[in-house]
Image: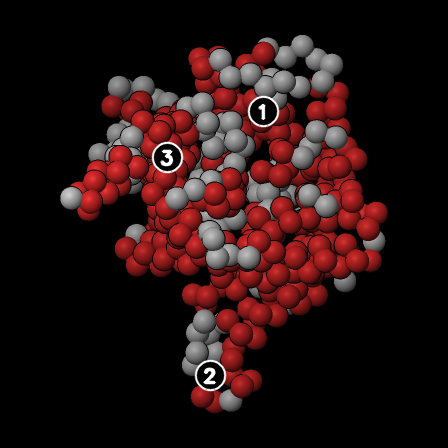
Amino acid sequence: MENLINIGIRSIFIDNMIFAYFLGMCSFLAISKKVSTSFGLGLAVVFVLSVTVPINWLIQNYVLNAGALAWLGDDFASVDLNFLQFIVFISVIAAFVQLTEMAVEKLSPALYGTLGIFLPLIAVNCSVLGAALFMVGRPYNLTEATVFGFGSGIGWLLAIVALAGVREKMKYSNVPAPLRGLGITFILVGLMSLGFLSFLGFSM
Amino acid sequence: MSTAVQEVVQEKKSEPLFSKKNKKLLSNPLDIDNPITVQVLGICSALAITSQVKPAIVMSLGLTFVTAFSNLFISMLRNTIPSRIRIIVQLAIVSVWVIMVDQLLKAYVYDMAKLMSVYVGLIITNCIVMGRLEAFAMGNKPWPSFLDGIGNGLGYGVILISMAFVRELFGGGTLFKGLPFEWQVFKSMGIAYQGNGLLLLPAGACILLGIIIWIQRSINGYRESH
């Protein structure tokens, strides 16, 4: 249990998807102008991450790894499908995002109205594929992988809401014209990331 | 007689391979339509792998290759792809090209492939590729799409390499480390330079990119309304 809490806290603060790895930056920068929309997108990312990471864990460990197909019989024990990793992972993610979109559309049209445009964008949010690839590189079991996916999502949500909060205030500041918009946002993200570096001091 | 006339008409209709419009497709992404600084696409890798010039060059080449060929193939298939499932089709084609780049890197420059770790795989979700497929290749003929892919790859490369240049020079005090013409800039001038660790952090990269955007927009006059 302690181990799980550690992984959760690590993935939210220390290994934050945005401030430590800079994954998922495109939608992070594009959709952080208002707190309310960024919160909706953040929730959707949390949901997609905490479902696709365990699914991809199962696929990696029961299909793709060298010898993982042994449960099909001895003939398959020597098969190594690792070279298919990217295409399988991204298909799982894209398919899942499309399924989520259809389910939300049917079950809760109101939520679909607010999230509508952002939902398909999650398929190309690099933090989703990035988390799946990081998960492969670390010796997690299924529960740990789920916690890692969930934690990474929460970290992303935290980052985008924080940036949106700052950007809402930035509207009233007198920024030099060429720096306005994207330029000042990058400098802000850099400074926020320096702040998050202080979490590195925690030993877990 | 009639065939000759037809040929002339045909010739008038088809434009030269490098017409003015096609040249624009190559040159615009380098400056006023830059994928990173104007379209805000492909930021993640721009921040993550620019601490040295060499990986930045490899990444730009890889991305240019993937964007150009995915654009070409999607453009050839654009009339047959059903729009409901187009994202999966696009991602499948992109990942085929990314797998090729990945396997090539692993086969010929293994240490480079190790250094770039997940970021090669992340070319799949590099928004430049998807963004150009959606914005350009789905609505244009194969040849312009191919050029658009190359142009955007190069525009990405220009920003990537200029960032890597500054970061490696002031962060590590070297230039082109790992390449045959490696240059210990400060050592060769007899200066004991202590590398600036901030520039090697992604945070430093972010601030640097902000400043590059500032300089670029001061020069070309592009403004963003709040």
- In terms of secondary structure, where does tag 3 sit? helix
Which of discs 3 and 2 lies nearer the camera? The answer is 3
Same chain? Circles 2 and 1: yes
Q: Is residue B205 left or right of residue B149?
A: right
Tag 3: Cα neighbours inside 10 Å, few (<14), some, or many (≥20)? Answer: many
- Cα–Cα gap, marks 1 and 3: 22 Å
Residue drawn where x is 47% and y is 43% of the image: B139
Which of discs 1 and 3 lies nearer the camera? The answer is 3
Tag 2: Cα neighbours inside 10 Å, few (<14), some, or many (≥20)? Answer: some
Residue drawn where x is 46% and y is 51% of the image: B78
Residue drawn where x is 76% and y is 40% of the image: A39
Residue on which the image places disc 1: A182
Callout 2, which amino acid?
Ala
Depth check: A156 or B92 in front? B92
- In terms of secondary structure, where does tag 2 sit? loop
Numbered marks: total: 3
Which badge, 2 or 1, is on the more N-terminal residue? 2
Disc number at residue B151?
A: 3
Q: Looking at the picture, how far across and down is residue A45, in whole percent?
A: 69, 49
